[in-house]
Image (cartoon, rainbow, N blue to C red):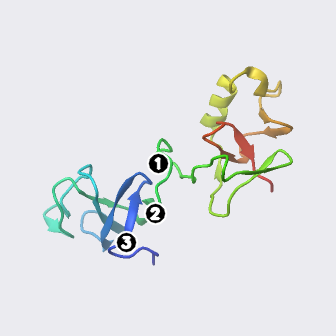
């Protein structure tokens, strides 16, 4: 398996912890491919060694091992959670609105709307209950959202936007 990350590259772990890659490869502590990162701040888990095996050197608590899939080249919005896929932060400046639908920038990834998010939106609505329909779907304009729809969520408005198929 190949990555497009290299040793010495600046990255963010889970989109929120900045650091520099110091190790890429297999380890003795777990199967598969791993990235060893020296974090900017002492919020890590080790000093570059795990189980008595040294993979790289850094100050205590500044090293962390993670799967390369958890690395990004840019920070992502905090609060997106490390176990969920992350999406570039959307703002009014990078959303172009056309006919009531959002056209995301090319760098934005679309993630599926989770049932818990849909249920939360249905319970709380937005500023008012006017976004709830009788059929149990969340509305934005004329677009009904249903479980399984692909959406973009804007931090600015907090409402899901249905993605054109």
Disc 3 residue crowd, few under 14, some 14–19, many 20+, Cα 10 Å: few
Name the quadrant of the N terminus: bottom left
Residue ranking furthest to the front: 93
* Left or right, 92 with reference to 48: right
Q: Kindly tell me whether residue 31 is visible in this rendering.
A: no
Name the spot of residue 12 as percent of width and height, x first. Answer: 40, 59
Q: Does label 3 or label 2 sit earlier along the sequence?
A: 3
Name the spot of residue 34 as percent of width and height, x first. Answer: 34, 67
Residue at x 83% of width, y 44% of height: 100
Q: Quadrant of residue 108?
A: bottom right
Would you place residue 151 above or below residue 126 in this image?
A: below
Q: Secondary structure at mark 2?
A: helix
Q: Does label 1 or label 2 sit earlier along the sequence?
A: 2
Real-space CA distance between mark 1 and mark 3, rounded to the nearest whole angstrom: 23 Å
Q: Quadrant of residue 132?
A: top right
* Left or right, 8 with reference to 61: right
Would you place residue 16 above or below residue 7 in this image?
A: above
Give me the disc on residue 9. Answer: 3
Residue at x 51% of width, y 44% of height: 80
Q: Which residue is mark 2?
A: 69
Q: Secondary structure at mark 1?
A: loop
Q: Does label 1 or label 3 sit earlier along the sequence?
A: 3
Name the mark nearer the viewer: 1 or 3.
3
Residue ranking furthest to the left: 52
Name the mark nearer the viewer: 3 or 2.
3
Residue at x 42% of width, y 54% of height: 14
Name the quadrant of the C terminus: bottom right
Q: Which residue is mark 1?
A: 83
């Amino acid at each position: 398996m190949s990555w497009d990350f290299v040793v010495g590259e600046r990255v963010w772990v889970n989109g929120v912890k900045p650091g520099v890659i110091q190790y890429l490869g297999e380890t003795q502590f777990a199967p598969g491919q791993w990235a060893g990162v020296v974090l900017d701040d002492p919020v890590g888990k080790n000093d570059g060694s795990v189980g008595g095996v040294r993979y790289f050197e850094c100050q205590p608590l500044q090293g962390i091992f993670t799967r390369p899939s958890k690395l990004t080249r840019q920070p992502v919005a905090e609060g997106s959670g490390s176990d969920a896929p992350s999406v570039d932060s959307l703002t009014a400046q990078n959303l172009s609105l056309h006919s009531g639908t959002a056209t995301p920038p090319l760098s934005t990834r679309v993630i599926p709307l989770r049932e818990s998010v849909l249920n939360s939106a249905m319970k709380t609505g937005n500023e008012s209950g006017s976004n709830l329909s009788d059929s149990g779907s969340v509305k934005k304009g004329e677009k009904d959202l249903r479980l399984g729809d692909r959406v973009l969520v804007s931090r600015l408005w907090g409402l899901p936007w249905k993605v054109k198929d």
